[in-house]
Image: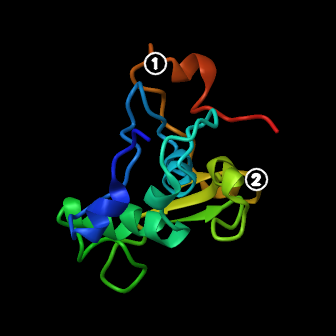
């Protein structure tokens, strides 16, 4: 299968971080990326990664936290909720470690806190968040079609 050999990279001790790319060709949604790392499948269900190249949920999340903090040189500021590190966290719509693999891509943040400040809130947390800033650039397709792809059940 044609997918980056992430498992082999990790076995060889090569530093690996995970992210969304956040470009026109990739979703800003981190749950889509985490789903791909765990299931090896695209949003549409195409199997790209072989079973021996898939990661456990713990491994995938570690690439997003520890791995990415290493790449940005911020290991002492990010990756854990401890005194002296940034107070960045999210309350999720579902338990990442308990939902079926196919449901990982449907997880959403219902509360996001960055640097100790609420930056996003919906449902029970909507009153805690400030209004979102205007979409930039104004011509972005996000202004016409919403934030990111959401599959209907």
The residue furthest top is 139
The residue furthest left is 73
- The answer to whether residue 123 is above or below residue 14 is above
Residue 147 is left or right of residue 10, and the answer is right
Residue 93 percent across, percent down from the top left: 71, 58
Dot 2: what SS?
Answer: helix
Which residue is painted at 29% across and 70% down in the image?
Answer: 11
**Which residue carries the number 2 mark?**
123
Q: Quadrant of residue 138?
A: top left
- The answer to whether residue 82 is above or below residue 89 is below
Which residue is painted at 48% across and 63% down in the image?
Answer: 55
Contact (CB < 8 A) between labels 2 and 1? no
Q: For the residue carrying disc 1, how many other residues have a C-alpha within 10 Å: few (<14), some (14-19), or many (20+)?
A: few
Dot 1: what SS?
Answer: loop
Which residue is painted at 44% across and 69% down in the image?
Answer: 59
- In this figure, which colouring scheme has been used for the structure? rainbow
Residue 128 percent across, percent down from the top left: 63, 58
Which residue is painted at 64% across and 51% down in the image?
Answer: 108
State the separation of the CA atoms marked 2 and 1: 26 Å
| Number of marks | 2
**Which residue carries the number 1 mark?**
140
Residue 129 is left or right of residue 73, and the answer is right
Quadrant the N terminus occupies:
top left
Residue 48 percent across, percent down from the top left: 49, 41
- The answer to whether residue 49 is above or below residue 86 is above
Residue 114 percent across, percent down from the top left: 43, 61
């Amino acid at each position: 299968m044609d997918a980056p050999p992430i498992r082999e990279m990790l076995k060889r001790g090569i530093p690996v971080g995970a992210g969304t790319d956040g470009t026109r060709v990739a979703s800003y949604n981190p749950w889509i990326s985490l789903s791909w790392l765990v299931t090896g499948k695209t949003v549409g269900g195409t199997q790209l990664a072989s079973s021996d190249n898939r990661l456990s949920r713990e491994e995938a999340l570690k690439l997003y936290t520890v791995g990415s903090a290493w790449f940005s040189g911020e290991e002492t500021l990010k990756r854990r909720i401890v005194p002296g590190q940034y107070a960045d966290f999210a309350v999720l719509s579902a338990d990442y470690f308990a939902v079926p693999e196919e449901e990982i891509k449907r997880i959403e943040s219902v509360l996001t806190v960055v640097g100790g400040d609420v930056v996003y809130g919906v449902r029970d947390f909507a009153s805690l968040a400030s209004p979102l800033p205007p979409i930039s650039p104004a011509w972005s397709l996000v202004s016409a079609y919403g934030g990111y792809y959401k599959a209907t059940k």
